């Protein structure tokens, strides 16, 4: 009863706020919102209230009468069909509606504590706030220095608890050390639509989007704001709406329990405690028109010689290394598989600098650091060595590269596979990246992932894209990079970034997955769907998948046939196939590559492929280690 009463109180407070909104909302805004109400409300309130039989007969009679539209209803429906869809509504209208309903300034001082931020979130009912510097009182301006969200506060507390900090120490931490710096904040524009902003938030995994107008943050939009914009206050509160939409959904019985996971999930959970292993293969192709004397602009410029094949000419670099370190819990020794790729920036050649050196030293130092850490761990018996995160590994390698005064720059992507927890952690700066391919049957795929164009009987496979890492670019064909000029670059608009600025994330890995880590030489020339096709051909050629699909593979696994050793022998072939496909496409002037398509979208005339160095680290996830006794 207490829970229901609390719900009623919350509903009453919300209705009160929204009635105030309705009385002062602009006429044009209310009209736009009514369009959404007519579309969304009908689908939202499909469940009819339970009534006694005599009353039900009256309700059904009334429903039959209402089924015949009147002339006024027909006219209203015609007017509604001419109005814009929700996804086409400008975000400034959402912001205006939010501020009209309840004005709250979403800011917190830069010298505030975590305690202050939590109180601000709760008392003002906000999930994001700009961190502002108010020290310059003469200008009477609040200079934005970063963004702090409720999700950030949860991360702070989780990390601090893990580090053994007391509650007072956690709450007294400064928010300025935990916020997203202003130069990394993702923002929206007032003339963008709800659809555009939603897509941006989904792609980047963010829930708060500051709206920028002429260098000033006009407000912060959340997914909740966009959802609430769909409905008019009269359709959210009141007795009728409560009885129709809420009353039958409040309160669970004492016998309520959680459902068993679906079959395909149970199959995975049954083996979740079993470690997974990765077989790795690498391939590296130089720019096809590259020689020891330089790089040709085209085939005519390069001359009649055979295309370049010597990997030492490539400005790319990579490493694959195993280190035995303490796991995340800090209690168990575990073998960690690290891998990385780097793409040296070729324009350094114009300044007399070898573009290959920086990327090679950066990746080489990653390997050295892991080797030293593993040796130290063995020497101390595992008492003074912990798992090195990809971002930390990049930071330490970059520090050593600078100390060696290696001039140049490169993009970088470094990952580590946790075989026990089945997690791939990675940090990426620039336009290299990672994709994960997975067999997902249509019966368990989401609505958007299902293949609705090819009949099931004609499909060759259900190999799908499970994950694509986020790239970081300053502008088209201008990726962010790690670099050193001989002195520190202080320009905030520089394309040079630190490891702390990298796109850092994790992805859950399943047995049978194919992971591709590569430089832009692959992604600029081979479409993601074509990469999937190449991977499928590799699986079929080597009998990892047959006409029986994943059911046959699962039965093979259950019988103990993992084909692990064969996978270890075959995986380099996949890396080679992808590099070869990238080279073929880069030399084809008749078909626009992904690079050419993106160039045209940015008003740059480019046709065909994009000749470049290409490095691929291909990985196949298996259930037992290769060469197991």
Image: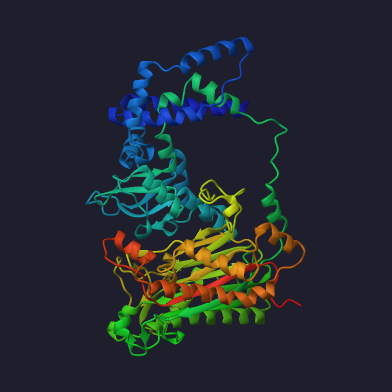
Q: Residue at x 54, y 61 (%)?
A: 506
Q: In this view, does 601 lie above or below 343?
A: above
Q: Which residue is drawn at 49% across and 27% down?
A: 11
Q: Is residue 629 visible?
A: yes
Which one is in front, 520 or 419?
520
Image quadrant where residue 273 sits: bottom right
Image quadrant where residue 69 sits: top left
Which one is in front, 35 or 500?
35
Quarter placement of the C terminus: bottom right
**502 to the left or right of 328:** left
Q: Measured from the top left, where is residue 377 in percent x and y?
A: 64, 78
Q: Measured from the top left, where is residue 511 in percent x and y?
A: 65, 63
Q: Residue at x 34, y 44 (%)?
A: 193
Q: Measured from the top left, where is residue 575 in percent x and y?
A: 53, 74
The colour scheme is rainbow
Quarter placement of the N terminus: top right
Q: Is residue 3 above or below residue 430?
A: above
Q: In this view, does 216 lie above or below 47?
A: below
Question: How many numbered circles does the render carry?
Answer: 0
Q: Can residue 124 be seen in this view?
A: no
Q: Which residue lies furthest to the front in this view?
A: 458
Q: Measured from the top left, where is residue 625 in percent x and y?
A: 69, 73
Q: Residue at x 32, y 28 (%)?
A: 31
Q: In this view, does 574 lie above or below 351?
A: above
Which one is in front, 166 or 487?
487
Which one is in front, 232 or 133?
232
């Amino acid at each position: 009863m207490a829970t229901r009463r609390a719900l009623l109180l919350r509903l009453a407070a919300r209705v009160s706020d929204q009635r105030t909104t309705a009385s002062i909302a602009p006429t044009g805004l209310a009209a736009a919102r009514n369009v959404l109400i007519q579309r969304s409300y009908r689908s939202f309130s499909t469940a009819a209230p339970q009534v006694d039989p005599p009353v039900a007969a009256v309700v059904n009679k009334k429903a039959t009468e209402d089924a015949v539209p009147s002339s006024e209803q027909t006219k209203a429906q015609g007017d509604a069909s001419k109005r814009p869809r929700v996804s086409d509504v400008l975000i400034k209208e959402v912001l205006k509606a939010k501020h009209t309903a309840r004005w709250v300034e979403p800011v917190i001082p830069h010298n505030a504590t975590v305690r202050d931020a939590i109180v601000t979130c709760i008392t003002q009912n906000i999930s994001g706030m700009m961190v502002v510097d108010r020290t310059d009182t003469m200008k009477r301006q609040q200079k934005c220095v970063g963004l702090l969200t409720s999700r950030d506060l949860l991360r702070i507390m989780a990390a601090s608890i893990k580090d053994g900090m007391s509650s007072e120490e956690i709450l007294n931490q400064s928010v300025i050390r935990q916020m997203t710096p202003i130069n990394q904040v993702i923002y929206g524009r007032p003339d963008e639509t709800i659809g555009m902003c939603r897509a941006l938030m989904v792609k980047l995994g963010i829930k708060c989007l500051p709206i920028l107008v002429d260098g000033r943050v006009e407000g912060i939009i959340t997914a909740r704001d966009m959802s609430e914009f769909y409905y008019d206050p009269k359709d959210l509160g009141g007795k009728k709406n409560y009885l129709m939409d809420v009353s039958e959904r409040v309160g669970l019985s004492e016998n309520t329990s959680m459902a068993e996971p679906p079959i395909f999930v149970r199959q995975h959970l049954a083996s979740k405690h079993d470690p997974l292993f990765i077989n790795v293969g690498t391939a590296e192709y130089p720019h096809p028109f590259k020689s020891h004397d330089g790089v040709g602009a085209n085939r005519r410029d390069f001359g009649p010689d055979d295309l370049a094949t010597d990997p030492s000419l490539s400005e790319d670099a990579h490493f694959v290394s195993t280190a035995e370190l303490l796991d995340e819990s800090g209690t168990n020794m575990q073998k960690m598989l690290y891998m990385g790729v780097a793409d040296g920036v070729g324009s350094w050649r114009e300044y007399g600098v070898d573009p290959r050196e920086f990327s090679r030293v950066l990746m080489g130092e990653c390997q050295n650091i892991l080797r030293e850490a593993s040796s130290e761990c063995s020497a101390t018996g595992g008492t003074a060595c912990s798992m090195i995160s990809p971002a930390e590994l990049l930071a330490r390698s970059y520090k050593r590269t600078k100390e060696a005064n290696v001039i140049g720059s490169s993009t970088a992507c470094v990952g580590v596979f946790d075989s026990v927890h089945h997690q791939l952690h990675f940090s990426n700066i620039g336009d290299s990246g990672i994709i994960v391919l997975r067999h997902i049957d249509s019966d368990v795929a989401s609505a958007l992932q299902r293949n609705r164009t090819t009949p099931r009987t004609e499909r060759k496979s259900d190999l799908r894209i499970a994950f694509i890492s986020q790239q970081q670019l300053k502008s088209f064909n201008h990726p962010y990079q790690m670099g050193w000029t001989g002195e520190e670059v202080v320009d905030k608009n520089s394309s040079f970034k630190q490891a702390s600025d990298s796109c850092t994330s994790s992805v859950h890995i399943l047995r049978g997955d194919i992971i591709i880590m590569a430089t832009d030489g692959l992604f600029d020339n081979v479409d993601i769907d074509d990469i999937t096709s190449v991977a499928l051909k590799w699986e079929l050629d080597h009998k990892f998948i047959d006409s029986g699909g994943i059911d046959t593979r699962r039965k093979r696994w259950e019988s103990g046939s993992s084909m692990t050793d064969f996978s270890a022998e075959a995986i380099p072939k996949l890396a080679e196939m992808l590099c070869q496909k990238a080279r073929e496409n880069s030399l084809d002037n008749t078909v626009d590559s992904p690079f050419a398509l993106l160039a045209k979208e940015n008003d740059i005339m480019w046709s065909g492929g994009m000749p470049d160095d290409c490095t691929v680290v291909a990985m196949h996830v298996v259930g037992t280690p290769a060469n197991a006794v």
